[in-house]
Amino acid sequence: MAHTNDRETIKRLLTTKGRWAVVGLSTNPARPAVGVSKFVQRNLGMEIIPVNLKGEDVHGAQGYKKLADIPGEIDVVDCFVNSQRVGAVVDQAIEVGAKAVWLQLGVIDEAAAARAAEAGLDVVMDTCPAIEAPRLGL
């Protein structure tokens, strides 16, 4: 069965202060992750944690190479990787005990979404916080 986003889940994730691990966030200003993560950090008040191949710091936040390297709890794993690679990121999110996964606009993996939901994670797929927040008046 195809995943359907729940508006209340989206609203709760966007309004509950938390730690967002942003996978695919690097210092490349041409990438959508840069602007969206800045929106999540500044407009929604979330702590962002960049996760990228080099472990680069972004927006004043310490970067890491993988989710397992991040100390402490992760509330949301925000996925800026292509659909073919997101399943592995979702599996890592489950392994580290994240509370939710957010697959960005155009990132779709029904099987990964189902695995996350079965593991008890909230799942949002194929949309963006910078789109959903204004829709909700945030």
Image (spheres, rainbow, N blue to C red):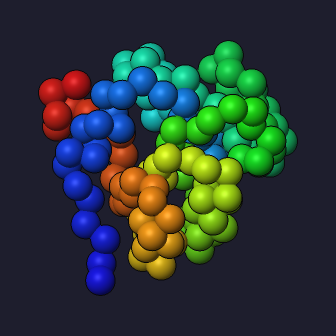
Asked which quadrant contains residue 13, the reply is: top left
Q: Quadrant of the N terminus?
A: bottom left
Seen from the viewer's position, the closer of residues 134 and 69 is 69
Name the residue rendered at 47%, 24% in the picture. Answer: 46
Seen from the viewer's position, the closer of residues 92 and 118 is 118
Horizontal and vertical percent position of residue 129: 35, 39
Above or below, comparing residue 96 to residue 62 in the picture: below
Above or below, comparing residue 115 to residue 93 in the picture: below
Horizontal and vertical percent position of residue 10: 28, 44
Task: Give the farthest residue toward the right.
Answer: 54
Name the residue rendered at 36%, 46% in the picture. Answer: 128
> Left or right: 106 with respect to 83?
left
Horizontal and vertical percent position of residue 136: 17, 34
Seen from the viewer's position, the closer of residues 29 and 69 is 69
Asked if residue 31 shows in the view, the reply is no
Q: Quadrant of the C terminus?
A: top left
Horizontal and vertical percent position of residue 81: 59, 58
Name the residue rendered at 75%, 33% in the picture. Answer: 71
Asked if residue 19 shows in the view, the reply is yes
Asked which quadrant contains residue 34, the reply is: top right
